[in-house]
Amino acid sequence: MEKLSKEQVKHVANLARLAITEEEAEKFTAQLGAITDFAEQLNELDTTNVEPTTHVLPLVNVLREDVAVKGLDREVMMKNVKDQQDGLVKVPPIITE
Amino acid sequence: MSLFKKSAAELQELLHSKEVTIADLAQEAYDRIDAVDGEVGAFLALNKENALAQAKEMDEVPFEKRGPLYGLPIGIKDNIVTEGLETTCASKILEGFNPIYNATVVEKLKEAGMVTIGKLNMDEFAMGSATENSAIKPVHNPWNFAHVPGGSSGGSAAAVAAGEVPFSLGSDTGGSIRQPAAYCGVVGMKPTYGRVSRYGLVAFASSLDQIGPITRNVRDNALILETIAGVDEHDSTSANVEVPHYVDQLTGDIRGLKVAVPKEYLAEGVSDGVRKVVLAAIDQLKELGATVDEVSLPHSKYALAAYYILSSSEASSNLSRFDGIRYGYQAKASNLDELYTKTRAEGFGDEVKRRIMLGTYSLSAGTYDAYYKKAQQVRTLIKQDFDQVFEKYDVIVGPTTPTTAFKLGENIDDPMTVYANDILTVPINLAGVPAISIPCGFDNGLPVGLQIIGKYFEEGTVYRVADVFEQATDFHEKTPQTWEVK
């Protein structure tokens, strides 16, 4: 793989919704570069026809009965919401000029 | 005081003979915390008022209605949600978060009558191996305050080692119970993936995370696992496999047991001191009647890279929920996108940001096949290594960590060196099998952990081996200097 660039790090930070400064971008580029260099060793292994493991237990479609179950009360669910009005969650404008 | 040096059974005897009350035990925990936690730093939020009131009420309950853990104090890692008791994952982003329900494990402990003393410090979101990534404060190793306690369950291991509580819960994604247990000289179990419900465990890497007990002896550890294990309708990945009475499986006999020692686990990178202590422990197992053979887990060296890609990928997805809107820290912002990016930038520490970015990168179009999928394929090879060895052997044994606890601040700017510390624990999480770390000696005054790895859902065998070793040795009875503090 190509070496991770500072531009890529900024792009990834944006995808992950993390504001980063120019200085942080420099630092993370070096640190993430060291980690991805280390990860290159996986390419020493031939994994042709090896199935990927997403989960170690052979579980398929764990379902419950399709019956309605009472959820938590709204008041309880709103307990940790910082900004709220009339039982609704308030957020800043989505579109600004 | 050495009340918490006693086992659960011994504490029950004291309660039954009315030498102490449940309220005394809870008070003892808070007194110990007052005396030593300023230096250890294991505890975050304390449940003092509730716990003492609850303990007093529990003292009224007749003995015939009490189980073996009734009235005993326990500390809970801060990534396990506790209703009404602040839960932060040692992160600024969850500052002031007051959970509205209990994790399944907390409910089960409550049913068994255990008293929650407080929440235990950890690496932020369980990402780290030294508890130096706690956004609140570092934890110091009770054996030597200049050294780290390990991580991420550093608070859970240090609190037990320092005698602040006799038992705690931790969580283990890549070694986060076993490595601090090894560094602090206590017993820490990572159960089989799916053995314990993850409902209410703040998710780091969902295909790897497991909750498990940290204790001073093997028997108590088995007792607590038995209490918290089992299928749970709230966690679809919890396994519908019967939970045996682990304590009944402690037969004290390992004659004829087949032990495998992977040559990769004693290779280069493992310090001479740790190797010497662990080889002596393996000899001890032989003397106790086990047969020991050297085996190979050939893909071990690739586990670390696969682990960091997979765990970070899962974390990048799991931690996307922290948006500043529904709970925790909220940055000032003039529009929604800014609210997300500023809350996350100000709320997460550097290690968490690094892993979110590594994960996001590994999952991106163009890198997905080369990193994420490749790591999943390597995971298959690692799992197969274990499957093959377990066709012929009952347990796999080796060191828990390559060295003893390193010094605080020594590796803080070098993530790769800290990651390398997990080389002997991450393969176990990738395979999903159970493993315990128990005290097996000392190197330069710091504890060394022996790791015993079992087959899927055979925690009973792991406990049996650990118990036999413990009965034959006295390492678990040693206590650090903090016990002298009155």
Image: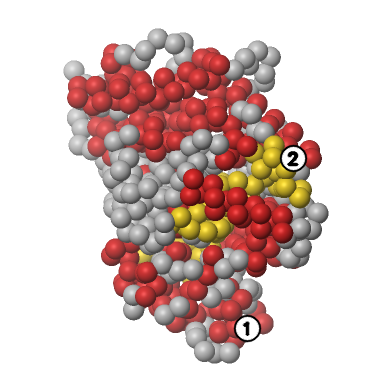
Say if B417 sits above or below B52 in the image: above
Residue receiving disc 2: B390
Circle 1 — which element?
A: helix
**Which residue does the image show at 31% across and 13% down from the upper left?**
A5
Numbered badge on residue B63: 1
Q: Which subunit holds the residue at mark 2?
A: B
Q: Earlier in the sequence, mark 1 or mark 2?
A: 1
Marked residue chain, label 1 = B
Q: B35 left or right of B333?
A: right
B211, above or below B262, in the image? below
Using the image as rendered, state which of residue B288 and residue B114 is in the foreground. B288
Q: Residue furthest bottom?
A: B18
Residue found 60% across the figure and 24% down from its top: B378
- The reply to whether discs 1 and 2 touch (Cβ–Cβ < 8 Å) is no
Residue B280 — which label? none
What amino acid does circle 2 point to? Answer: Phe
Q: Position of residue B179 (x, y in %)?
A: 49, 49
Q: Nearer the viewer, residue B16 or B82?
A: B16
Question: x, y (%) of residue A69?
Answer: 60, 47
Quarter the C terminus of chain B occupies: bottom left
